[in-house]
Amino acid sequence: MLYKRSSELFAEASKVIPGGVNSPVRAFKAVGGTPIFVKEAKGAYLYDEDGNRLIDYIASWGPMILGHAYDPVTNAVIEKAKKGTSFGMPTEIETKIAELAVSMVPNIDKIRFVNSGTEACMSAVRLARGYTGKEKIIKFSGCYHGHSDAFLIQAGSGAVTFGSPNSPGVTQGTAKDTLLAPYNNLDAVKTLFEANKGEVAAIILEPVAGNMGCVLPKEGFLEGLRALCDANGTLLIFDEVMTGFRLAKGGAQEVFGVAADIVTFGKVIGGGLPVGAFAAREEIMKFLAPEGPVYQAGTLSGNPLAMAAGLAMLTELNNNPEVFTSLEKKTAYLHKGLDSVLKDSGIEYTISRFGSMLSVFFAKEPVVDFETSAAANNDTFKKYFHGMLKEGVYLPPSSFESYFLNDALTYEDLDFTIAALKKVVPTLK
Ligand SMILES: *Cc1c(COP(=O)(O)O)cnc(C)c1O
């Protein structure tokens, strides 16, 4: 495959956009080479600027769960655009999508729409702090909740129980209010509670992690967090920006049967337009301005185009819940196929999957947290990524990202992908 035009476009972009991209993972830093510029996409396929067709396994990092340029969503946006694209005043469609979301997701009475997952998580934490009157939060290493200051924190060293900034520009003052624990480690969370008695406003986590590759919660982990939150007057925030409307209508809460106090959304809920949202039961949501004292706002929040795309997407999923089973079956099929190719290859690997999320790690040990994910062999991953790309399969360009399957993928596409891995395997050693 030739990437001449993409390389030229990347060079031009790099002159006027930092690193040539508007979000870092797109730049291929983790795998080397230059990123591919998309011209258009339809269904399960991306068409790049050089005329290559790629089978897409990232689905815009999740939103395109029914495939690209899905007609009901596209048409809803086109029709809405003709009637004005932003008013800064209430519109009926905001209520429609809110009613639908509240009916699909357990344990929520009200929902506030924002423009990104970052905003949703940032606002959820402010709301939790406002509601509980406490300041600290617990997050897990390797979970991503957007790029707001409170989340760009890494584990502190030695005896220090609070975090330190992992990006310049984040202050020590902010870092000291974010406590870090390893994913799947309830004991570490218990220790944090003991050391910070009465101070923890919320635990926030990805109920199935997708930002250290796909990592599953161990049996009892989510239930254990729920119990610790209840015992300590702390709110449990499920960041369902990836899992919401992907694992099931009601997301991870429904699948695991564990209730969160606040849930955040993004990605699928916007149908490919910039949308995020956070939701909770009435007694918590009433703390939010203008009803309550916790401030949160947005000029373009509830934007008509974004709401039209989101409403069309949620309506499709609500009316066709068999999509979730279909996706799960396809992902399990892919899992089995990739596994059967790698099994006899002599290459160390482990595959994680939950629903329509999947990751291949070139790791010896099972991947259960950030440490075990980071221990995977990145040189093998790079070869794997570029090998598959050459065959026409677009995988996440970082081992810390999950695949997101879309329902436009056919079994022929999956077989093609498995066959591609067969060709690539000899180059991995
Ligand atoms: C993508 C993501 C976010 C951030 O959403 P943006 O829309 O990129 O700001 C937050 N949490 C999780 C779990 C995500 O996957």
Image (tube, rainbow, N blue to C red):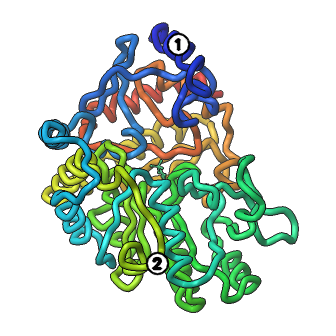
| Residue found at x 16% / y 52% | 316
Q: Which residue in the protein does label 2 denote? A: 293
Q: Callout 1 environment at 10 Å: few (<14), some (14 to 19), or many (20+)?
A: some
View extreme (bottom): residue: 231
- Which image quarter holds the C terminus? top right
Q: Which residue is mark 1?
A: 7
Kindly report the distance in space between the C-alpha atoms of the residues bearing marks 2 and 1: 50 Å
**Residue 178 placed where, x, y %?**
68, 68
Q: Amino acid at mark 2?
A: Pro
Q: Position of residue 78 (x, y in %)?
A: 16, 36
Mark 2: few/some/many CA within 10 Å (<14, 14-19, 20+)? few
Q: Which mark is residue 92?
A: none
Q: Is residue 410 left or right of residue 389?
A: left
**Residue at screen point 20% across, 49% down:** 308
Q: Is residue 50 above or below residue 47?
A: above
Residue 321 makes an appearance in the image: no
